[in-house]
Structures are given as C-alpha cells and as structure tokens.
Amino acid sequence: MTITLTQVSKRAAPVAGAVALTFAVVSAVILAMGANPLEAYRALWTGAFGSPFTIGQVITITSVLLLTGIAAAIPFSAGLWNVGGEGQLFAGAIGAVCAALTLGPGPFTLVSSLLAGAAAGAAWALVPGLLRAWLGASEMIVSLLMNFVAVFAAGLVIRHIFPDTSGQATRLIERESRLPVIWTAGGVNLGIVVAGVLAVICAIVMTRTRLGFGIRAVGLGETAAELAGFERRSTTLSTFAIAGISAGLAGALLVLGAGGQLSEGVSSNYGFVGIVVALVAGLRVAWIPLSALLFAALTVGSNGLQIGAGLPFSLGIVVIGVLVLTLLATRVITLRK
C-alpha cells in the first residue's frame, strides 16, 4: 500500500505528458472556435475551484468516482470486464432510498440505508458474476445490459412506489436520515469519509490479503491461478461482490446526500466515468483517489466554461475524451481482455 517516490515519478511523468498533449489538442480546438484557450482554462479552473461551493462539488463527485473507479479496477485486475458500474450504482441508490423511506426517521436509518445500498449493488453485480462463473457468459455484455435494467427499475420506484408530487423523483428522505454535512461552506457530507474508508480497506485487501493475491493471480490467467491454489469461480464471485458493494455505496451516497431523493438523472454517467478513472490509475486502488479528483474537477469545472469563456459545457466532455485518447495513444492506459 506504500507508494514510493520512484513509483510516483514512473506514473506521474507519462500522465503529465499525456495531459500536456491533451491541452495542446484542446487549445487548437478552442482557437478554431474563435476563443482564447487561456481564458477557457481559467474558466475551467474557476468553475472547479473558484468558490467553496464548487470545491465542495468537486469533493462530493470525487467520492462517487472513487467508488465507481474501485468497482471497475478490482474486476479488471482479475481479467474481468465490469462495465456495469452504472447499473450497480442505480441498484445501490434504489436500495438506499427504499430503506430510508420505509424505515422513516430513526437512529439506525442512515446506517441501514448505506448497508441496503451496498447489498443491492452487490446483488446486482453478482448476476454477471454468476453467469460468468457457472455458464461462461460474457460478463462484459451481461453487466452492460444490466445497466439498462437498473435504470428501468429506478423508473418504477420513482413513478409507482415512492413518487413525489411531480412524479419525476421519489419522495424526499428526512434530513435526519441523510449523511451529515461536515463542511457547511462547501456542502460536503460524510460520504467522502465513507468512500475514503472503503478505498483504504480495498487497498489493503488487494495488497495485503490472500483474496487480493488471488484476484491478481486470476488476472494473470487460469494456469497462474491454479498454480497459486485459487479456484476461478469463487474468486470471480468475490470480485464482483466487492465491485457491487463499492458501486452500490456510490449510489447510496448520491441519494443520501444533499439531494435526498432518487431521480433518473441522479448519476451523470458516474459508473462509466469510473471505468476511465480506474484505467488512468493503472488499476491500482491507491492511485484511484487522485484519478477521481482529476475527473471530478473536469466535470465540475465544465460548468464555468459558458459563463467564463462563452464556450459550451460540452467542451469539458471533449477534454475528458481527448485525455483518454492521449492516455491510450501514449500507452499510459491499455485495454486488455
């Protein structure tokens, strides 16, 4: 779990080069649009770190991307493609909001809702895990399709089980049943602590336990797993369960935070962005917080582009896309099945 200066330089140098190349490409795009790149980057920075509110937004989204990044990184380390983080996030959000609204205000409602979110995410992730382990089905296809089912299930909960007066979201969770705010100026709640604790636990599991060694061994191939004494089926199920817990907690944090309700737009594709977060971090849990912070800052900072530089919000998505492409082109991240 310890990160040395040598490891930092080996990882940071190529990433910095890819970031520089990204800024060069995006600057050319901005110039072609008739705008000043320096003003655009200033607006991007101000949009992310210009006020306590925006800093709080960056921290809050970082906590979610940290969890969805873990949900992708751990299966990828085992050679398993979990592209269902978005669905597992929605499952966790459904579990958390149903638990909170069913139990009502109480001393144990918050903890029960977090656990319900984690359990729902794990159950959702185990579907592709079981089909992969016992039937040899493609976990990539199954987990991808499960995303759409989860969004449909969220719609049923919103419109038919716990609808509010508008029918566009569930009823509000009582304030005392939501995550406590730990930084009032930025609106940051206890979710960042929950995400940080889980990240530490997962980092320890991956680097200091037999299960983590087994996950990495399975990722090296079936022969390596057998030589190390690990059974692929059980490791596959354990891997997907951990991923589902992490993504499910991300969904729980979203509905138990300031919003306090579930809507179909509760996630801005955080499950899919988590895949990129994991790849940029080199599938190492210890690096995921920094990667999550980078993408959270780009996501929030994009809001300032239109006001500060007269550029469309979508330019922030372009920055993320170009960054991913340059990271792939420079082989900072690689895609292997």
Image (cartoon, grey):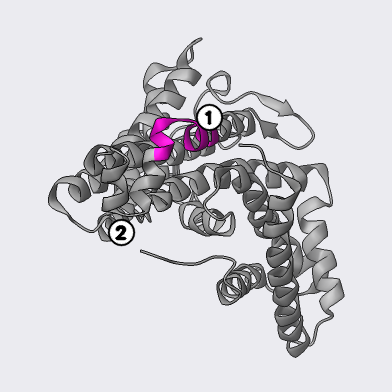
- Rendering quarter of residue 246: top left
Report the front residue among 91 and 218: 218
* First along the sequence among labels 2 and 1: 2
237 relative to 9, above or below: above
- Does the magenta portion include 206? yes
Quarter of the figure with the C terminus: bottom left
Left or right position of 153 against 40:
left
47 relative to 313, above or below: above
108 relative to 228, above or below: above
Residue drawn at x 81%, y 51% is 49
- Does the magenta portion include 220? no
Residue at the disc numbered 1: 201
Which residue, as the protein is rendered here, is positioned at the far left?
135
- Report the magenta residues as a range: 202-213
Query: How many other residues sit within 10 Å of disc 1, few (<14), some (14-19) or many (≥20)?
Result: few
Q: Secondary structure at mark 1?
A: helix
Residue at the disc numbered 2: 140
